[in-house]
Image (cartoon, coloured by chain):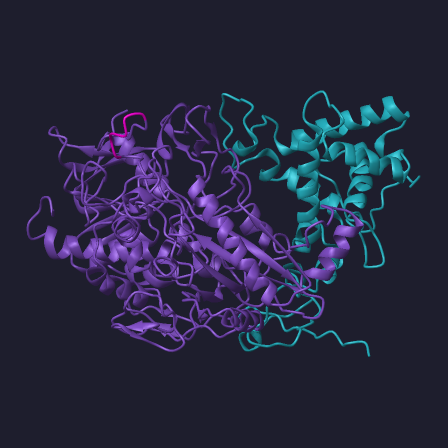
Amino acid sequence: MSATKLKEVDVVVVGSGVVGSIMSMELASAGMSVVCLERGKQFDLGVDFHTPNVYDELKFDRHSDIFQNLARDTLTFRNNGGQSALPMREMGAFKPGEMVGGTSAHWGANARRFLPHDFAMRSRIEERYGKSFIPEDCNLQDWGLEWDEIEPYYDQFENIFGVGGKAGNLDGEIQEGGNPHEGPRSREYPNPPTRQTYQGSLFAKAARSLGYVPFQGPSAAMTQDFRNLYRVQMSQCIHGGFCSSHVCSQGAKANPLTAVLPALMRLPNFEMRPLCNVLRVNKDSTGKKATGVTYIDARGNEIEQPASIVILGAYCFSNTRLLLLSGIGTPYDPQTGKGTVGRNYAYQQGGSVEIFFDDKEFNPFIGGGMVNTSIDEFNGDVIDRGPLGFIGGAYFDTSARGAAPIKGKPVPPGTPRWGGEWKKAVAQNYRRTMNIAMHGTCLSYKQNYLDLDPTYKDAFGQPLLRMTFDWHQNELRMMEYMNERCAEIGRALGGSRLGGKNKGTHFSIVGYQSTHNVGGAVMGEDPSTSVVNKYLQSWDVSNLFVVGGSAFPQQPANGPTETIGMLACWAADAIKENYLKRPGALV
Amino acid sequence: METTLSDNPGGASYVYLQEPEIRFLEAAVEHLIPTDDLGPGARDAGVVVYIDRQLAGSWGSHGRNYRMGPWRDGTPQQGYQSRFTPQEVYRIAIREIDQHCRTTFDRPFAQLNRDTQLEVLQQLETDKIALPSMSSKFFFDLLWRNTDEGFFSDPLYGGNRDMVGWKLLGFPGLPTSQYRELLTSHEPYHAHPVSVMDVQSGKVPVDAQGFPRHVMIEKES
């Protein structure tokens, strides 16, 4: 059956998450005709996510229908090239979203910028410790971005997502109360910082006693009623928990549904098409120009949507897979090290230390992960890793977890897994535990990559994406060190016992860890080691932009969403200000 | 525990599970979360009803899981690779464990004394009983995961009856709009829990924003 060919539009955007919604908004506001294709459903915030039904851990965290439907497509996974990859049959380590609003509809609203160091990690490491300090099989590379050129786009994103925080560095001047290690900011956050919880105040005191500088982490759950850059109103968070994995029924957590779509859906030159699965990007006979995309619509019809500009703005996995399925760029070959598509896949390291008290009681159900007190002394360039023998770092925080009762019941080490003793331990500790989380870097390695699976197919008969990934010694050494530092803070807190968890020696797809999957279509200065240039424009096809976590050459410690949003603003501006005036390669 | 009668005070109807399976599960989950001084255990909390409803729903047939072949055994890191859906796992495993108990002890699991039941569960957990169709640990892990979910999820799913799981923790269930002011409080906040089911059934009214008002628990002096 041949595809139905629709009328050409200026821009077709694949994915409606942070990237898809913001880029659609920016380009449609500039007068371009924009169509956004989303594989998931369109939800109505007030109907589908009604209070009190949203406060349901089983429905949204365990058996969610706003996460990717694996019955249709998933990915396959193996720890190394010697194994056969098998499909991720049930949701585990990460939970990519599937709805209008994307993965960020259920994000945790931790809105941290990266540090200037993170964008030039290879240069900074080489400068400080020499080339030989970098492991031989490590594909560490710079992003090709300067802090001063991207800072305004962080600022723009924060004014769309209503981020609350206290500046620690205004134009180079260190500010009391903020993070002294952050990159220079051109102005304050649009909203005030979160308030400190009981747990936060204890953490801050212990951290100060060890010489660290605690601060309230930036939050994209509104710290006051706020009207954003797009004139959309968001209301102050009530701190009822149920944030990550959940859609906020109060409209207090900034995400595409609350911060962008109310304005975007009003634009007459914009169209959202849910339940559309894009199969490939189409090219002309030269292979140098994209002509649009082909997708399967909600009725199962094959549709071709021609467009002058194609933007892949989907999750890291989908962006990479669509490039591979479309034959754009050269697939990465781990044997030769040649090729770029699928290269530099990375994840997020992390772990936690739990502090059990006999004499203190908390309200762990009030809050949410974005209400946190943090330190940055082990992040970026702040920490001298020379004597420690690893690259990378971590930030630590203690958050008002909004502890949901199925997953939020830590027990001290040595407690039986079930039975009467376990029940006693759960009852004793649910309200008497606080935890310090470590969020660590993950570098990219020659052996960790994404390609197409030779065996398994999706519901449309197309090959699944295959992930080959394992932890490397550098990350394990780093976390060993971080665990010790974190336990020191834990001891300074004076609890009766310490516990905690880490990710183990080998990456496992089982059990939720983090939805911070990055790389596969990375940005950079050199076409032999990157898929897109500094403006997120394909080196091979100049009217194709590939924007998102897929562009990260490796994973810094701070969560990816803020930087994904910044890149969306940055790429949209490059299209409006430069590309439209002179279509063609921007670099 | 010599009784073989179902303790079914709510008069729950079972949609997927059949009689011997209900008996088996009531006995098993009572070991996983037992009734004690702290309060009711998993059986009285309705965890078996919870498991039944989950098995009857789309999760029970892995409606959102990838179900295409080829089916191969993987490494532990590669996760769930069984061809069996949860419906099939429960049906097959319970029959095979009861068969093992009949062969070894002359009785099905539900009719063994408590100590023997406990021993069998420990053997299942450590994979020491060889079932014909699957690893016994594989079944045990699924049973424990579902028992935990059933005991602590909203009562609208059939478990956590009278919110016994939440009372055990001191979790107040649905938040109130007062949390905004309570965020920075150093005082423990103890309220009678409110569930989605309480709101559905009209037991607890909600304000214009959809939030209930909490009733505080008086401290015993």
Going by the image, does A382 lie left or right of A148? right
Percent of width and height locating residue A585: 11, 44
At x 37% / y 36%, what residue is drawn?
Answer: A299
Q: Which part of the image, by quadrant, shows the N terminus of chain A?
A: top left
Q: Colour of chain A?
A: purple
User: Residue B218 location in percent, x, y?
Assistant: 76, 77
Q: Is residue A532 magenta?
A: no
Secondary structure mostly taken by the magenta-highlighted segment of the chain: loop
Which corner quadrant of the image does residue A487 belong to? bottom right
Question: Which residue is at the front of the view, A508 or B170?
Answer: A508
Q: Which residues are magenta?
A: A335-340
Left or right: A281 in relation to A203: left
Residue A144 rendering spot, x and y as whole percentages? 21, 50
Quadrant hosting residue A293 = top left
Residue that lies at the very extreme toward the left in this rendered image: A582
Q: Colour of chain B?
A: cyan
Q: Is residue B66 above or below residue A188?
A: above
Q: Nearer the viewer, residue B48 or A183?
A: A183
Q: Going by the image, does A547 lie left or right of B80?
A: left
